[in-house]
Image: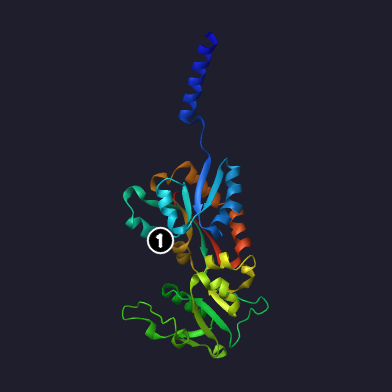
Amino acid sequence: MKKLLFVLPLFASCAALFACGGNKDNTITIAASELPHAKILNEAVKPVLKEKGYDLKVTVLEWTQQNPAVARGEYDANYFQHLPYLNTYNAEASEDNQLQLVVKVHFEKLCLYASDLNHKTLQNGDSIEIVNDVSNIERALLLLKDNGVITAISPSCYGADGAFTFNTTNPNGQVTFAEEYRDCRITCIQESNLAVSLQDYDFGVIPGNAALTGLGNDYASRIVFGEKVDEDILSLRANGVAVRKKDAKSDKSKALVEAFASDSVKNYIASTFGDSVVYHYENLIA
């Protein structure tokens, strides 16, 4: 009986210790899009966090589910979005479900990709696929214009308010090709089919996430040229890590922010994704 009386107080003391934080949870859970986000987390960020005593658990989740999942407390953070998208989400979310970016990490460039690695110089008569989403067509055409493939976009594509419109069934009638590319042709393709359809065209203007997901491990070697970006665009459109507002300065959030600042993460992004993904680090909770 005396032994039992001794054990019970000891057990009670241990329970109190764990309840007061003696069993600190060093697991960070994060939802992310598959590429490049989850790949960056698993292959570059996880080792950095491990050195700091944290175990990073990454779950690939469809992007429309990630903000609600973090708001419900199912994950500590997510990694898939830029600030404009998060602002749209927060505008419709209740006060309890508000999220905050704690760090900006990378920008995915729109690039022209070659179908044939032995034919990476655009020539007269080549075929080019671009996205059929009107909200992104202008971006694709401006990429071609900035690189001298087309010289102008028809004024008819811009309304009195400056809004861009486009007839996807007649793309070549709304652009002017440079003389050396006068016989080239543009075809509008659904974004989800751009990567798989590249084999049917000489070149394709493909968003970064679609290229990463669909073109395979040699996608970086297929890049002919990409968007010219400045610091303003990088800052506005850089994808980052979001957490619940109340968790913005938690130990886990701070650990994530510090991990992304590592030179090993910066060098990993540059060496793995080539010109299609640009490292852009901003600490938003410093």
| Left or right of residue 107: residue 114 | right
Could you tell me which residue is drawn at 53 percent across and 65 percent down? 209
Which amino acid lies under the numbered mark 1 shown in the image of this protein?
Tyr
In-image side of 111 versus 169 (left or right): right
Number of residues whose C-alpha sits closer than 10 Å to that of mark 1, classed few (under 14), some (14–19) or many (20 or more): few
| Residue 259 percent coordinates (x, y) | 55, 49
Task: Classify 258 as above or below 154.
Answer: above
Horizontal and vertical percent for residue 154?
41, 86
Farthest right residue in view: 118
Asked which quadrant contains residue 155, the reply is bottom left
Q: Residue furthest top?
A: 2
Q: Residue at x 49, y 85 (%)?
A: 151
In the rendered image, is residue 227 in sight? no
Q: Which of the pair 131/143 is nearer the observer?
A: 131
Q: Is residue 93 left or right of residue 51?
A: left
The residue beneath circle 1 is: 85
Count every numbered label the image shows and give the total.
1
Q: Coloring scheme of the render?
A: rainbow
194 with respect to 100 (left or right)? right
- Which of the pair 66/231 is nearer the observer? 66
Q: Position of residue 110 (x, y in %)?
A: 52, 71
- Compared with 208, 178 (above or below) is below
Q: Nearer the viewer, residue 92 or 161?
A: 92
Numbered disc 1: secondary structure? helix
Can residue 173 be seen here? yes
Residue 139 rendering spot, x and y as whole percentages = 46, 74
